């Protein structure tokens, strides 16, 4: 999974937009009242996803296939965990996961030289998050099954999935073709 921040602007604003994006992503202010106000938005987004049977089936597939590890962990906050989202916990998450060596900056309709220049200047302006040794836990496929009562839904939603190949696997193109053929 990834987190993406994007902006559309006229090309002449690249020198302003790149430092603004990098500064906001790496060093947000995270004001307590703003974080608290976002709790409602997070709850609403979770409720909307729970009403989408395709999203629920997708979530259940991952929970069953990777039980209690990596890809099987919940992708949205529970009502119980919302109160733990504070400026301090979010900042801690940022320090653990948002570092230049884990980022990609992409530009369309801007030269590589121009984009690189403003990215380098932007990172130099900030005391960037230091590089750390981060443990990369591999996804452990467990397989399994999960059932959920659909409540008042009239339709039944089913899905079957198989362990695939990693995005780094030399077999990825073959797996992609197979997935395309199977629909």
Image (cartoon, rainbow, N blue to C red):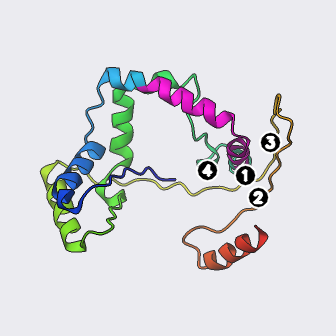
Which mark is first along the chain, 2 or 4?
4
Which residue is at 31% across, 65% downward?
A: 107
Disc 4 crowd rating (10 Å Cα; few below 14, some 14-19, many 20+) is many
Alpha-carbon span between mark 3 and mark 1: 9 Å
Q: Nearer the viewer, residue 69 or 51?
A: 51
For label 2, the crowd category at 10 Å Cα-Cα, with few meaning under 14, some 14 to 19 and many 20 or more, is few
Q: Which residue is denoted by mark 3 in the rendering?
A: 146
Mark 4 lies on residue: 71
Q: Which residue is mark 2?
A: 161
Give above or below for 174 relative to 50: below
Evaluate if marks 1 and 2 touch, with contact meaning CB atoms under 8 Å apart: yes
In the foreground, 178 or 69? 178
**Relative to residue 89, is residue 93 depicted above or below?**
below
* First in residue order: circle 3 vs circle 4: 4
N-term-proximal mark, 2 vs 3: 3
Magenta stretch encompasses residue 53? yes
- Of residues 121 and 51, the one nearer the viewer is 51
Q: CA distance from mark 3 to mark 4?
A: 15 Å
Q: Are marks 4 and 1 in contact (CB under 8 Å)?
A: yes
Please state if 49 lies on the left or on the right of 36 as rendered: right
């Amino acid at each position: 999974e990834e987190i993406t921040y994007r902006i559309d602007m006229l090309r002449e604003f690249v020198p302003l937009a790149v430092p603004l994006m990098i500064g906001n992503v790496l060093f947000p202010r995270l004001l307590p009242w703003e974080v608290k106000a976002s709790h409602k938005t997070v709850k609403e987004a979770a409720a909307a996803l729970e009403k989408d049977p395709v999203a629920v089936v997708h979530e259940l597939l991952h929970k069953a296939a990777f039980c209690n590890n990596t890809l099987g962990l919940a992708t949205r906050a529970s009502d119980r965990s919302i109160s733990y989202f504070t400026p301090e916990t979010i900042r801690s998450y940022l320090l653990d996961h948002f570092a230049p060596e884990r980022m990609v900056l992409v530009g369309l309709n801007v030269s590589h030289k121009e984009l690189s220049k403003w990215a380098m200047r932007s990172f130099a302006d900030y005391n960037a998050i230091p590089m750390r040794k981060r443990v990369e836990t591999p996804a452990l496929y467990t397989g399994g099954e999960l059932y959920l009562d659909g409540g008042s839904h009239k339709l039944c939603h089913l899905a079957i999935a198989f362990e695939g190949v990693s995005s780094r696997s030399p077999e990825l193109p073959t797996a992609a073709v197979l997935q395309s053929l199977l629909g």
